[in-house]
Image (cartoon, coloured by chain):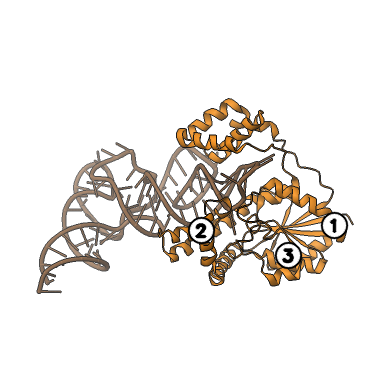
Chain colours: A orange, B brown
Amino acid sequence: MKNTLIVLPGPTGVGKTDFAIELASRLGCSIISCDSRQFYREMKIGTAAPDDEQLSKVKHHFIGFLSVTDYYSVSLFERDVMTLLPSLFAKSPVVVMTGGSMLYMDAVCRGMDDIPDTDPAVRLKYLEMYRTEGIAGLRIALKMLDPAYYSRVDLHNPRRLMRALEITESAGRPYSAFLTSTARERDFRVIRAGLTRERGELYRRIDLRVEEMLRKGLEAEAASLIAFRGLNALNTVGYREMFSYFDGAITLEQAVALIRRNTRRYARKQLTWWNRDSEINWFDASDTERIISWIESTLKL
RNA sequence: GGGGAGAUACCAAAGUGGCCAACUGGGGCAGACUGUAAAUCUGUUGUCUGAAGACUUCGUAGGUUCGAAUCCUGCUCUCCCCA
């Protein structure tokens, strides 16, 4: 049997963690977590990271291996997973990967193009340009430096514009020149079983999970991280809302309502992303046996 | 009991004779996405339609007018003040 990565995408709160543990236990393999916020060890509660009991059942990788102050990125994740996988496949012909970070998942399954690192000073330069000249300034600059990308980028999105500009300037070549839009060859097979649920059911589970986070001490966890609120890792549902509660801008009740709402939105966004991935076979997450039997029969093919 | 204010689409809230199917915000729904991605951004939101367009809306029942969410009258309800 060819080495196979069993990928389980699914919206937040759908029940990926439990299912992945069940599956990996049966297959006797370990789990690669693909959740860009569960990477951080200081953010266990708000990201609903697997707890000690769950972690003791199956070996997990990429849970809590970073500090919020560490720099990390999609391409580093791709590199780290590619480095780790051979050793995992040496122990088992299958490996389970689950999580909610769409781009990170794609990076592992299809690869990211090689794009050079940027000079932080260049990023600051364009951030400053955005502040002083607004989106229009970024557009003018991009139109000049990378007309090809300009013609297809979302011209309303400052992040995308600044990113393209900083790459172009740092590398001395247009950003678009680095984009190949071809999937990278992998020496293992990838099969995808998407976990979803009926929308109302998913929303109910999200609400319950937010309640559980509060019981487990989300407020205290967020409070302990308030000094790091400016870091990217903390620009995360569950923490942002708590910070504005600490600021006195909203009540705790409002913060909780916002966390629920923003989590639902995130779930929808995830579904939108995966919607265009025709290689995902979708299942109702409650159909554990059905999913497992599909995976087992697919592995034999 | 007396006086005043108001009832607008899922919610809030503009509109005070034609440019109104109705500003705007929220929410909902949909979409984009190549190292900030749980981020960042976009569209749409009365009904039917692919669209042009048609049809039904602004508490309710009438009326005035070529024409009403906008003016008049009755009714219902809500809020505030005085008793």
Nearest the viewer among A174 and A109 is A174
Q: Is residue A116 above or below residue A226?
A: above
Q: Amino acid at mark 3?
A: Ala
Disc 2 crowd rating (10 Å Cα; few below 14, some 14-19, many 20+) is some
Measuring from the top left, give residue A27's x and y in whole percent.
Answer: 82, 66
Query: In whole angstroms, how far apart are the C-alphas of marks 2 and 3?
Result: 32 Å
Q: Earlier in the sequence, mark 1 or mark 3?
A: 3
Tag nearer the camera, 2 or 3 = 2
The chain that hosts pointer 1 is A
Q: Quadrant of residue B76?
A: bottom left
Which mark identifies residue A226?
A: 2
* Number of residues whose C-alpha sits closer than 10 Å to that of mark 3, classed few (under 14), some (14–19) or many (20 or more): many
The residue labelled by disc 1 is: A89
Q: Nearer the viewer, residue A269 or B6?
A: A269
Report the quarter where the N terminus of chain A lies: bottom right
Task: Check disc 2 and report its element: helix, strand or loop.
Answer: helix
Q: Are marks 1 and 3 in contact (CB under 8 Å)?
A: no
Q: Is residue B40 left or right of residue A52?
A: left
Q: Which residue is mark 3?
A: A20
Label 3: chain letter: A
Label whose residue precedes the other's in the sequence (2 or 3): 3
How far apart in space, not on screen, are marks 1 and 2 (Cα)? 40 Å
Q: Type of residue at label 2?
A: Ile
Residue at the image position 88 percent from the left and 54 percent from the top: A2
Identify the image quadrant of residue A281.
bottom right
- Residue A181, given in percent of the width and then of the height, sits at 71, 38
The reply to whether discs 1 and 2 touch (Cβ–Cβ < 8 Å) is no
Name the kind of residue labelled 1 in the image: Phe
Residue plotted at (81% across, 69% down): A26
